[in-house]
Amino acid sequence: MWSRIVGAWLVAIVSAAWGGATGSAQAKRTVFDGVYTDAQAERGKNAYDKDCAFCHLEDLTGQGFAPGLVDDIFKHRWEDGTLGELFAIVKATMPQDKPETLSAATYADIVAYVLKVNKYPAGQEELKPDAEALKTVAFKK
């Protein structure tokens, strides 16, 4: 169990060090451009409640080793990152007890829900479950 927790944090640190600084420089869009739909975020809420809320809590504030996914904690962590990096980390490390067991579409839905809770605007197209393509979407305007 500890090795998975440490592994998840290492993935986050390495991603931030390698991709975070350069990722937003390559980005063509931002999360403020409406990169998910309300319907997708609603599916994501259902998946989050089922697979994520136990550790990250229903209100996304986190507990213990599960970081908060909302407000300043989330926005500060991802301000220099890309949506592709977030998607890749969520997919590779969550759920903590069985990472990479959900479909890519479900991971995209969960990320859409996290974006909605953080008040990033919805758009007309769903967030695609493609980490490489999502690296062109920055968190900074």
Image: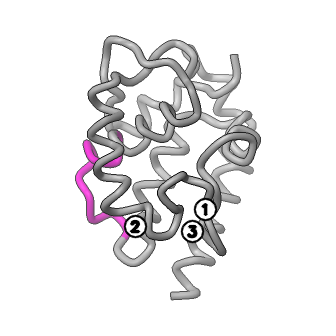
The amino acid on which the numbered mark 2 sits, given as a three-letter code, is Pro
Secondary structure of residue under mark 2 = loop
Q: Name the residue carrying label 1.
A: 62
Q: Is residue 105 magenta?
A: yes
Mark 3, residue position = 8
Distance (Cα) linking label 3 and label 1 = 15 Å
Q: Nearer the viewer, residue 76 or 46?
A: 46
Does the residue at mark 3 contact the one at mark 1 (Cβ under 8 Å)?
no
User: SS at mark 1?
Assistant: loop
Left or right position of 10 against 96:
right
Q: Residues within 10 Å of mark 1 (few under 14, many from 20)?
A: some
Say whether residue 23 is left or right of residue 36: right
Q: Amino acid at mark 3?
A: Ala
| Image position, residue 107 (x, y; %) | 34, 48
* Residue lying at 57% horizontally and 27% vertically, measured from the top left: 119
Above or below residue 111? Residue 119 is above
Tag 1: amino acid: Gly
Dot 3 alpha-carbon crowd within 10 angstroms: few under 14, some 14 to 19, many 20 or more: some
The residue located at (59%, 67%) in the rendering is 66
Q: Name the spot of residue 104 as percent of width and height, x first.
A: 28, 47
**Between discs 2 and 1, the one toward the N terminus:** 1
Hey, which residue is sitting farthest front in the picture?
Answer: 59
Secondary structure type for disc 3: helix
Rendered residue at 62%/55% (across/down)? 61
Residue 127 image position (x, y, % from top left): 36, 28
Image-quadrant location for residue 130: top left
For mark 2, what is the residue?
95
Sequence-wise, which precedes: disc 2 or disc 3? 3
Query: Magenta segment range?
Result: 99-108
> Which x, y percent locates residue 100?
33, 63
Determine whether 111 is above or below 23 in the image.
below
Q: Is residue 10 left or right of residue 125?
A: right
